[in-house]
Image: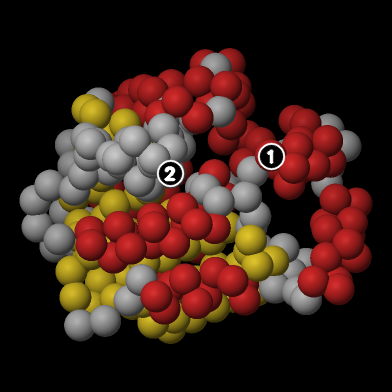
Amino acid sequence: MTDSTTVSPAWYPDELAHAGPEHLDQDYVAQYDRKAGTDPSEELHNLQRLGLSMSSTLIDLGAGTGTMALAAAPYCRRVVAVDVSPAMLAALQQRAQELGLTNVECVRAGFLTYQHTGPKADFVYSRHALHQLSDFWKAVALRRIAAILGPGGTFRVRDLFLSCALSEVDTVVEAWLANAPADSHQGWPREELETHLREEHATFTWLFEPMLAQAGFTISEATYTPSRTHTSYTCVLAS
């Protein structure tokens, strides 16, 4: 595991200091994958459909315990798993070693501090991590992501992007919370989702999509969940 960060201006937030206490807790990390319940197979298929190959470099920003990074590693040349949590990166690194994967690099950094080395990346992937940043810093992060990619590079992102009007927020959010599992062993219960909404930074699709355009991306695909709480985007950097 390495630290690979830029020297940021004093007015930048300290991402490493705001990793979230739960992400630094080894007991939490041990149960994270079970709670997330993420199957990477569909997203891996999407990346391969979009051109991921044995010549590709993939950057996984907010990699967590490495579900996507480890799934993609056998199918590309280089994977850089970036996260602010040393506990999660340690778990990721151990799993990579157990799987015999030699092309996975673990880097402790965040969206605003990761310093890319080597040739431009072909793909940047991020799932449920951008919500750690306010809209102002999301926009800054998107511009930094664009700088990591080569012309025509692909950015694939999924997060809590609400595809509803302001007048519908209460209805949409309450319906989402009502479907939360009662047992924390089966996912994030209502109480934890309420904390997420209060303390982290969900946004609206109609705010996020112009940010992507400002950063130089064209949206080639957008998938809005039926709950209208989450959205996945495939974005291509202008040549």
Question: What amino acid is labelled 2 in the image?
Answer: Gly
Q: Nearer the viewer, residue 191 or 134?
A: 134
Classify 137 as above or below 82. Answer: below
Q: CA distance from mark 1 to mark 2?
A: 18 Å
Residue 87 image offset from top left, x and y in percent? 43, 21
Quarter of the figure with residue 62: top left
Report helix, strand or loop for mark 2.
loop
Residue 205 image offset from top left, x and y in percent? 62, 72
Q: Which residue is mark 1?
A: 199
- Please give the name of the residue rendered at 88% of the width and 37% of the height, measured from the top-left corner: 182
Badge 2: how crowded within 10 Å, few (<14), some, or many (20+)?
many
- Please give the name of the residue rendered at 83% of the width and 35% of the height, measured from the top-left corner: 191
Q: Quadrant of the C terminus?
A: bottom left
Asked whether, in this view, residue 220 is left or right of residue 203, the answer is left
Quarter of the figure with residue 31: top right
Badge 1: how crowded within 10 Å, few (<14), some, or many (20+)?
few
Of circles 1 and 2, which is in front? 1
Residue 47 image offset from top left, x and y in percent? 37, 67
Q: Nearer the viewer, residue 159 or 39?
A: 159
Classify 139 as above or below 104. Answer: below
**Tag count in the figure?**
2
Residue 188 image offset from top left, x and y in percent? 74, 39
Q: Quadrant of the N terminus?
A: top left
Q: Which residue is mark 2?
A: 62
Point out the tag, 1 or 2, that comes first from the N-terminus: 2
- Please give the name of the residue rendered at 26% of the width and 81% of the height, measured from the top-left corner: 238
Report helix, strand or loop for mark 1.
helix
Tell me the colour scheme of the image: secondary structure
Task: Residue 222: give its label.
Answer: none
| Callout 1 touching callout 2 (CB < 8 Å) | no
Q: Nearer the viewer, residue 43 or 28?
A: 28
Question: What amino acid is labelled 1 in the image?
Answer: Glu
